[in-house]
Amino acid sequence: QKEVEQNSGPLSVPEGAIASLNCTYSDRVSQSFFWYRQYSGKSPELIMSIYSNGDKEDGRFTAQLNKASQYVSLLIRDSQPSDSATYLCAVSYFGNEKLTFGTGTRLTIIP
Amino acid sequence: EAQVTQNPRYLITVTGKKLTVTCSQNMNHEYMSWYRQDPGLGLRQIYYSMNVEVTDKGDVPEGYKVSRKEKRNFPLILESPSPNQTSLYFCASSPSPDYGYTFGSGTRLTVV
């Protein structure tokens, strides 16, 4: 059973600080990694994708991938109250069209 | 506007009464998928499709059927719904798994 693990939280971060969200996955042949944001009562929204080891930056968001440690993270700089949501990590496995999600981390930005 | 459209948004039905949740995308995406979301369990894949007439089971396919007769449509069929299928359902589409999915707005299904 391929697994994607996230700390469910809640994670509380002061406004303006860096929020750090973590995800581990079990299958070494994983190819593609995604972070989705889901506001309460809404559908998941893709915010970042990463495929190679290292960092990928997009505005206030940075995704970090370490395939050797089977670890992917999302950093949110200058956190805003509008960043309060559940963040879902998702992994796509090589040769398999499935996209497997973690259970999500609930993030609260405190004004 | 590029989007994935699901209908209905809300549905209350009785045990055993067949129902279909429709899903349509206007982005010419090859891949489509159905997920259910339950508290504490997250998003779990029910079925996915790689193209017309090509479908495969996800992690929780029992009690569900799908078909992909046209590229844009991917309906989810519950032949005999049971209360344990009460959930929030999402349809999603993608040009390929490497690009991530675009999700529809969701269908909240209650089976009594």
Image (cartoon, rainbow, N blue to C red):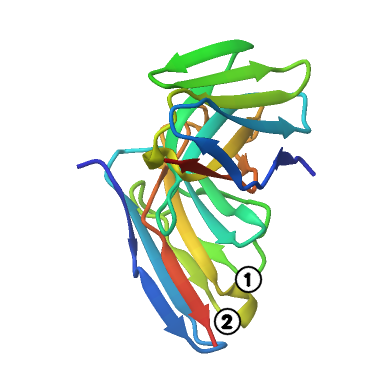
Compared across the picture, whether B18 is left or right of B3 comes to: right
Give percent across and percent down for residue B32.
46, 46
Pointers 1 and 2 within a single chain: yes
* Mark 2 Cα shell of 10 Å, populated few (<14), some (14-19), many (≥20): some
Residue at horizontal 54 percent and vertical 77 percent from the top: B79
Instruction: Kindly state the secondary structure of the residue where label 2 is placed.
Output: loop
Q: Which residue is mark 2?
A: B80
Please say if the residues under marks 1 and 2 sit with CB atoms less than 8 Å apart: yes
Q: Quadrant of the N terminus of chain B?
A: top left
Q: Which residue is mark 1?
A: B63
Chain of the residue where label 1 is placed in the rendered structure: B
Is residue A30 visible in the rendered structure shown here?
A: no
Is residue A96 visible in the rendered structure shown here?
A: yes
Does residue A64 sit above or below B63 in this rendering? above
Which residue is more in the foreground, A44 or B4? A44
Compared across the picture, whether A25 is left or right of B102 comes to: right
Q: Quadrant of the rendered structure where residue A34 is?
A: top right
Residue at horizontal 56 percent and vertical 26 percent from the top: A74
Amino acid carrying label 2: it is Ser
Give percent across and percent down for residue B87.
54, 69
Compared across the picture, whether B23 is left or right of A92 comes to: left
* Mark 1 Cα shell of 10 Å, populated few (<14), some (14-19), many (≥20): some
Seen as rendered, the residue at the extreme left is B1
Q: Earlier in the sequence, mark 1 or mark 2?
A: 1
Seen as rendered, the residue at the extreme top is A54
Does residue A65 sit above or below B79 in this rendering? above
Amino acid carrying label 1: it is Gly
Residue at horizontal 35 percent and vertical 51 percent from the top: B70
Q: Quadrant of the C terminus of chain B?
A: bottom right
